[in-house]
Image: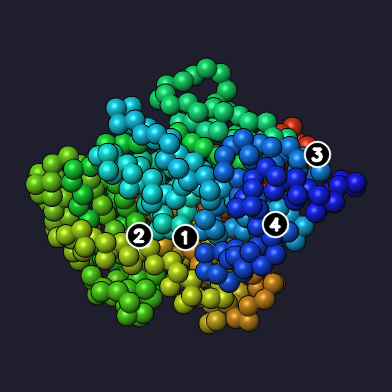
Amino acid sequence: MRKGLLMTDLLEQIAGIVGGQGLLTGEDVSGRAADFMGFTHVQARAIVRPASTAELSAVMKLCHAAGQAVVPAGGYTGLVHGADCQPADIQISLERMRAIEALDPVGRTMTVGAGCPVQTVQEAAAGAGLKFAVDWGARGTATIGGGISTNAGGNSVVRYGMMRDNVLGIEAVLADGTVISAMNSLLKNNAAYDLKQLFIGTEGTLGIVTRAVLKLHSAPLSTNTAMLALDSFEAVQALFVHAGKRLGAMLTSFEVMWNSFYQLIAIDTGDHNAPLPGGHGYYVIVEASGTDQERDAELFETVLGEALEQGIAADAVVASSKAQADQIWAIRDDIKTLSIRTMPAVTFDVSLPIVAMDGYVRQLEESARAAFGETMKLVVFGHIGDGNLHIILGAQPFAADTRHRIEELVYTALVPHRGSISAEHGIGLEKRDWLQITRSPEELALMRQLKAAMDPMNILNPGKVLAQEAK
């Protein structure tokens, strides 16, 4: 912080802007969880909760003048420590900016505050016969602003794309308090630079998103869900091709759980009614949505029957109700239990070509066993339809050097496949030092130029995404 302006003076000025409800200090800060499991607590000096873009703009002008670092925070469902605070930081929470401001059922758009939970948006869209299609397990806690800042993906990317594909306009506050209001609601707007892209997936390092215009879709009139058991990854690939050809644009989700995941969550815990017996190599959730329930259900069952007849799938179960479909998805979405049952371990979110996945996982298992012996534990699952694997890898004894070696094994094995160290969770602190694995020196240099131009004092989420260069 710049000399001459004490923290107490700054906080008093901020309180004058956001009011008593807008500023938290002391135990109101330290008592707040800083991760979705509640293992850590916020370390910031204060939490500022603006109620409008104008309030945040005024706060940022003060922080910029003082050289005060700020860290934006959403629903704390991220997994890369992208919202971690230092004790001298001010956290910016948009939890008071959660309104659904407008819903256009004809143009199929919704205008919301960045603090609005994803599930709230989904429910509001559904009430109008529409669908907000970006969806993941933490929907009830995750916020729209957090999803935008990390370019979240989730379970329906194979059909609807990631957050970037479902955001039409954005309002954001820059480091110096400047408001960029690019609240476009048009599907077609090619008027020079698309400035919203500066704030999607950049994790609050270039600006803080306060409002957004979201793209909605017509709500499907039919949804059909099934789980299939397969005995080889070649069969998984064949099923994906078969389902894509026969279901076409109806194919909404294609999720794969290696047996290591299914056995642990669906069988061993006893928390779920396993729809299929264990022992198969892979378990696939296929979901399709369309416009005619009777016709679509008949086609869906025909496609699955063909997969069984052709020997692609070894077993299958089709959900006969929404409750049964929810039970199937509950297995895939039980990340909290997975985290508890696999600790201590490192969680990864990588992407690579589907055809390379089997070889990659086999190589990783072999190298990890060679490095750690029988203490190694590996769990794999993911959004295979869009090339995204989630990996949990642990070993004993678990220490800093163990963690580094695990990261090295996972990330360096991506290089021959031109994969990415982050498919949908962002970079934060956890992946920052490995970014050069999948970004060229020229790309990194341009990123640093953008950061320097938009945040020359480095007060926006400092230290995240890009490592600071030695001077």
Residue 442, image quadrant: top right
Q: Identify which amino acid the numbered label 2 is placed on.
A: Val
| Distance of label 1 from label 2 (alpha carbons) | 10 Å
Question: Which residue is disc 2 drawn over?
Answer: 256
Res. 401 in view: yes
Image position, residue 201 (x, y; %): 56, 42
Query: What residue is shown at x 43% (from left), y 66% (from top)?
Result: 335
Circles 4, 3 touching at the beta carbon (< 8 Å): no
Disc 1: which residue = 390
Look at the numbered disc 4 and give the secondary structure of its residue: strand
- In the image, 344: left or right of 216? right
Q: Nearer the viewer, mark 1 or mark 4?
A: 4
Q: Which residue is mark 4?
A: 46
- Alpha-carbon span between mark 4 and mark 3: 17 Å
For the residue marked with disc 1, what is the amino acid? His
Would residue 282 be visible to someone looking at this image?
A: no
Which numbered marker is on residue 189? none
Q: Is residue 10 above or below residue 24?
A: above
- Nearest to viewer (mark 2 / mark 4): 4
Q: Reading the chain from its start, which is encountered first: label 4 or label 3?
A: 4
> Which corner quadrant of the image does residue 226 belong to?
bottom left
- Looking at the rendered structure, the secondary structure element under dot 3 is helix
Residue 65 disc label: 3
At x 29%, y 58%, the residue is 285
Residue 81, position in %: x, y? 62, 59
Q: Nearer the viewer, residue 108 or 316?
A: 108
Q: Position of residue 106 (x, y in %)?
A: 29, 27
